[in-house]
Image: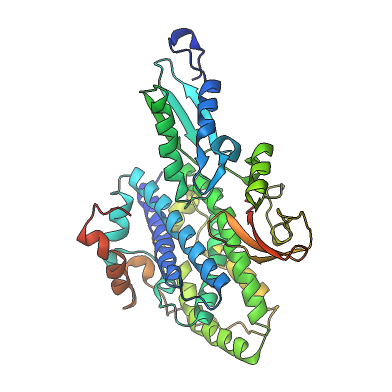
Amino acid sequence: MNTEAIKDLLYKIADDQLILGHKNSEWTGFGPLLEEDIAFSSMAQDKVGQSWQFYKILNELGETDPDTLAFMRNAEQFHNCQLVELPNGEYDFSLIRHFLFDTAELIRFSMLSESSFEPIALLSKKIKGEVKYHTMHANIWIKQLGSATSESISRLQASLDYAIPFALGIFEPSKFEEELKQEGIFEGEAVLKATWLGQIEGIIDQTALKMPSLDQSHLGLGGRYGTHTDHLQPLLDEMSEVFKVDPTADW
Amino acid sequence: MVINSVTNTKNISPEVIKEWLEEVKDPEIPVLSLNDLGVITGINIKETGKVIVGMTPTFAGCPAMDVMQKDVETVLQKNGIEDFEVILSFKTQWNSNMISERGRKALKKFGLAPPPKHNLIVDIELIEHAKCPLCDGENTEMKTPFGPALCRSMHYCHDCLQAFEQFKPL
């Protein structure tokens, strides 16, 4: 097994989960309705918990412990895509990001549940069932608000147009695409992206929204290699504030 | 490896240990034992006498798993077991069909709709129509697939006009 390739795969998944989980948690207490407040808070808890499980596999492969991995790295050491680090903005953007990202994630975990690397396969099989609730939630709201009033439609459309280039950054190929594929660990970002596109279009087609052009793919790239927007470092500073003051703090 | 109590002076067996574990409850649903929840995946006693208890998480991010693991360790210690290990693993995967009949009754009594049995394909149809645990009404509506804990969704019953929660099918 190519351990470097597996670690690279684990880091990007874990970092995506941790950062988006943290962004979702910023809705706690601020959701537009109580149910949505609870939904984003629950998804935050799922994602942060799932990131911990992936950091734990990294730990078993020789990396440092999960808390240190989560809290003690700087932005350029993070492998998350830029989509997940963008500010929550208004609810329409958070909803569009949730839809675009979680659709990709459910496909990723479905693919990985067949992985030849057993720890990833077992965990992905588990998480797949949990993330299904996330995509179910996203699809309900995109279909509802994407066909409701002119305001809801134009807001979602603007957020979709803005988010699409960043969403394409989810599928930025790693250095190890070939190795991962050959060893049966992961079929690769290109396969994931093609499936994702079909599913996203399948939902968008049921609404008044229009699929934006995909030819802006030069934007939103670099996250997998440590290039981030200015939003990530302040987020990490805030996340790790308590840990840095007292690494033994417990709550 | 499972062996009988021949080499074990304390005469303990996996069955006995399972009985001890009956007192360990889900900290968020105190009427439901871990046995009935279905998260205890194996109890083995090695030739050396070491006790290995296998557990599998309900949800990967469930904060109650830590508490459950510690509670299992406490019960083993309380019963005089010194050499033990409680291992959390995804090898045996939990799903809500693993909640026992007794567990389902306990959930309902607690006011939580038990998860519907499923063929491992959970879709919106399955979670939308929960049976009200308060009046057994079927005229209910899902308000959100999320709730106050990762394993619960929220519903409303149009028969008795009460909100209720369901233990999510997974």
Residue A153 lies left or right of residue B88; in this view the side is right
Q: Quadrant of residue A158?
A: bottom right
Q: Which residue is drawn at 63% across and 54% down?
A: B168
The residue shown at (52%, 13%) is: B4
Quarter of the C terminus of chain A within the rendering: bottom left
Q: Is residue B113 above or below residue A92?
A: above
At a point 31% along the width and 54% down the height, the residue shown is A67
Residue A29, x across and y down, in percent: 46, 73
Residue A247 visible, this orientation: yes
Q: In the image, is residue B95 above or below residue A94?
A: above
Q: Nearer the viewer, residue B110 or A132?
A: B110
Height in image: B121 above or below A206? Answer: above
Horizontal arrangement in the rendering, residue A132 relative to residue A250 (left or right): right
Q: Going by the picture, which residue comes out furthest to the bottom? A: A150
Residue A36: x percent and y percent? 55, 72
Q: Where is residue A126 in the image (x, y as percent from the top left)?
A: 54, 49
Residue B154 lies in quadrant: bottom right
Q: Position of residue B36 (x, y in %)?
A: 60, 37
Q: In this view, does B141 lie above or below B16?
A: below
Q: Which residue lies furthest to the top in this view?
A: B6
Number of marks in the rendered image: 0
> Residue A20 sits in which quadrant?
bottom left
Residue B93 visible in the picture: no
Please state if A249 lies on the left or on the right of A146 as rendered. Answer: left
